[in-house]
Image (cartoon, grey):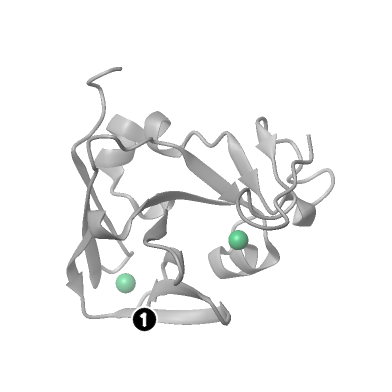
Amino acid sequence: MTSETPENITGGCLCGGVRYIITFPPDFSFESTTCQCSQCRKNSGSLIMRSLNVPLSALKYSSQDTLSTYRATPKAERGFCSKCGSFLSWRNESEQTISLTVGAFDEEVLSRWGVLLTDAKTHLWCEDEIPGVTDHLKGEKWKLDCTGEGAERMN
Ligand SMILES: [Zn+2]
Ligand SMILES: [Zn+2]
């Protein structure tokens, strides 16, 4: 156990309309994941989407005037800023957790805690990875999700 973990971090969208603070529970395991599903790719505009899954109760918005949501699938909600377009979160509504895009964490947070917060060793939806472009990641590759029915390792 190391004490070198943050108690809380801040983040938000590009224009500042959405701001939040995450207060980590004492037993929190800092493990981000990447998602290569075609929806996250389109939604983020990035080849690989990276997020940190936290308990819903750990997230408090200090400003959410421009927070909006979009459903690409019936059970999952994507949070974004309706003014500047930042993609901020993904949540399966049957779970009490929310995945926050790590690129929306504040710069000083990433400077200090970037490795801890973003070093993903679990990669989801690798079924959709692009040969020669996004198939270089090291760690556990899962065909779709890594939990629940149909979870299947690729390596
Ligand atoms: Zn914004
Ligand atoms: Zn995805």
Kind of residue at badge 1: Ser
Tell me the quarter of the image containing the C terminus.
top right
- On the picture, is 138 further left or further right than 80? right
* Residue at 25% from the left image edge and 40% from the top image edge: 108
Of residue 117 and residue 47, the one placed in the foreground of this image is 117
Circle 1 SS class: strand
Find disc 1 in the rendering and name its residue: 68
Image-quarter location of ligand 1: bottom left
Tell me: residue 32, above or below residue 115. below
Of residue 25 and residue 121, the one placed in the foreground of this image is 25
Residue count near mark 1 (Cα–Cα under 10 Å), binned few <14, some 14–19, many ≥20: some
In this figure, what is the number of numbered marks?
1
Tell me: residue 64, above or below residue 60. below
Question: Can you give x and y, in whole percent of width and height, for residue 49 in the image?
Answer: 56, 54
Q: Given the current orientation, which residue lies at the most extreme left position?
A: 62
Q: Quadrant of residue 15?
A: bottom left
Q: Given the current orientation, which residue lies at the most extreme front position?
A: 149
Question: Can you give x and y, in whole percent of width and height, for residue 81 in the image?
Answer: 36, 75
Q: Given the current orientation, which residue lies at the most extreme right position?
A: 131
- On the picture, is 140 further left or further right than 51? right
- On the picture, is 81 further left or further right than 47? left
Question: Can you give x and y, in whole percent of width and height, for residue 72 in the image?
Answer: 59, 79
Q: Quadrant of residue 134?
A: top right
Question: Can you give x and y, in whole percent of width and height, for residue 154 in the image?
Answer: 79, 41
Tell me the quarter of the image containing the N terminus.
top left
* Residue at 58% from the left image edge and 47% from the top image edge: 34
* Residue at 66% from the left image edge and 55% from the top image edge: 36
* Residue at 39% from the left image edge and 36% from the top image edge: 30
Of residue 150 and residue 83, the one placed in the foreground of this image is 150
Does label 1 point to a residue whose CB lies under 8 Å from ligand 1? no
